[in-house]
Amino acid sequence: MTHPENALPLDAPSRDGLAAQGLRYARLDDTETDAVDRWLQAAYRGFHFDAFTDEQLVQYRAGFGPTRSIGVWDPTAAEPESPIATVASWRSPLSFGEGRSIEAWAISLVSVAATHRRRGIARAMLEGELRAAHAAGIPLAMLTVSEATIYGRWGFGPAAYTADYRIDARGLRFTAPLPPGRVHRVSAAALRELAPELMRRAHAREAGEVPFDTQQFDRMFALAARTASHATKLRAARFDDEHGEPQGFVLYSVAEHPDDFAQHTLTVEYLSAATEAAHAALWHYVLDQDLVATVIAAQRPVDEPLPWMVANPRAVQTVARREHLWLRVLDVPAALGTRRYAAADRVLLRVTDALGFASGEWMLATSTDGTATVTAHVGEPHDAVHHDAAVVDLGVEALGALLLGGTPVDALRVAGRLAERSPGSAERLERVLRPTRAPFLSTWF
Ligand SMILES: CC(C)(COP(=O)(O)OP(=O)(O)OC[C@H]1O[C@@H](n2cnc3c(N)ncnc32)[C@H](O)[C@@H]1OP(=O)(O)O)[C@@H](O)C(=O)NCCC(=O)NCCS
């Protein structure tokens, strides 16, 4: 059942707008098994995923509980009990790194049936989510996206990026210092027990991570019906520090080369490190396999230090880099006030937002201890300049892109998405926002 904290009221403008098109916008009654199954099948069909088997439905239904699931139904459709559009959402912490986090409204499974596209149904659902979250006082909305063309129009900006690496592992010498401790080969099932706590600690170090739910863990460890066929391929190793404490793990699989027994390809499926020592030891383990010519590691941090940990940095090729986590600021002081900053300064952010939630002039005053105060600015921008503040104009989607420090301020300025009101303002903002490590989200939701 929807968790009470996620049971935000249905948005009236969206409901009324869709009703005017003859469509019913409603919360899914998740106590009704058949209705839940139809909703799940519709949502996954929207992404062209395989239909669920009965066994898979049982598992997905069990994990369905806490989220708020909305559907849109068309009474004139051939199968009117199946929704023609879906969206799921829930409150989730978003890590800001250094053990800090903010509550965000996670939005997922946005789908509109091919028979009903491009008539404003997704718009109604998205605006409905944002108004509901804002009304509930949630400072930020977030999503991961199928296409990067969709969500900017609703004020989302790409805030964390991922990279895919292809590593030529033949004869590659590992040069980073190897920490005390040891790597153990373990079964994926045994590791599944430890993973939530290890990953909680690993995620607290990063800005951009969100907690996984039970079902995600089960799928990741090939313990769910939908991923069980992968169980024989999945391998696992764990790193314990010098005191015997587990500090990280890697899940991987190896694909055999069709004709050459010494040219296999190892795919890193997930590498989680709660300490730098675990990170180094696990990469060393991965690269030190005999009979493996190529290592593939997708969806890793863009600033993965791996090229610096081996003798031949060119062996570590970045084969893709893409935006991954999209953020939409709903409450500027709360969103900016949660993170820590790299320098002391004062920056006036003049934010425009078509939906109004973030619109205004906000003075971000950061201190040398990394904290900030964010206040609504009263007065003219030249007052702020006069008081020695940097001043920038930007849209709410640019603010979302900048929030975790993963998007270069100057790139937005050059691209015309941020304008300086006084010379050097973009550079000052960059100095304030710059993170030690690039923000990173290791999953999809
Ligand atoms: C993406 C999707 C949800 C859009 O639904 P829809 O009801 O057709 O969207 P709307 O009619 O409300 O369109 C709203 C706006 O988004 C634009 N848009 C919609 N889908 C788009 C896409 N895939 N790429 C670019 N723009 C898109 C529309 O042109 C419209 O633009 P506007 O600002 O001029 O009004 C739907 O096409 C879909 O289910 N796609 C497959 C699943 C998917 O990718 N979901 C997104 C998950 S992250």
Image: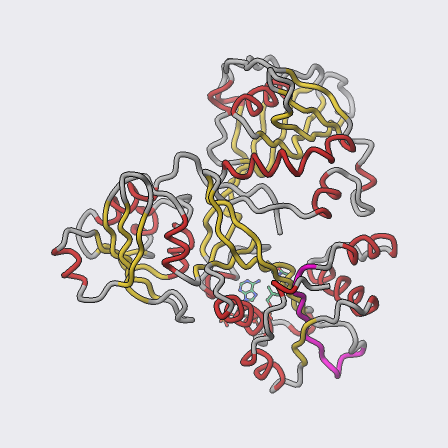
Residue 103 place in picture, x, y as percent: 51, 54
Q: Is residue 40 left or right of residue 390?
A: right
Horizontal and vertical percent position of residue 197: 64, 36
- How are the residues colored? secondary structure
Residue that lies at the very extreme toward the left in this rendered image: 386
Residue 27, horizontal then vertical, whole percent: 68, 72
Count of picture labels: 0
Is residue 397 positioned above or below 8 on the image? above
Q: Nearer the viewer, residue 103 or 264?
A: 103
- Identified at 75% across, 19% down, the residue is 260
Q: Is residue 329 above or below residue 356?
A: above
Q: Where is residue 427 shown, x and y percent of the image?
A: 25, 44
| Residue name at image x 43 percent, y 59 percent | 329
In the displayed orientation, state which residue is furthest to the right.
54
Q: Is residue 426 left or right of residue 51?
A: left
Give the image quarter of residue 274.
top right
Q: Indicate the quadrant of ligand 1 in the picture.
A: bottom right
Range of magenta residues: 66-78
- At a point 79% along the width and 56% down the height, the residue shown is 62
Image quadrant where one finds the N terminus: bottom right
Give the vertical position of 337 relative to 302 (above or below): below
Residue 76 part of the magenta-drawn span: yes
**Residue 98 occupies quadrant:** top left
Q: Is residue 283 left or right of residue 137?
A: right
Image point (26%, 48%), residue name: 426
User: Residue 442 appears in which quarter of the rendering?
Assistant: top right
| Towards the viewer: 111 or 274 | 274
Residue 393 falls left or right of residue 292: left
| Residue 353 is covered by the magenta coloring | no
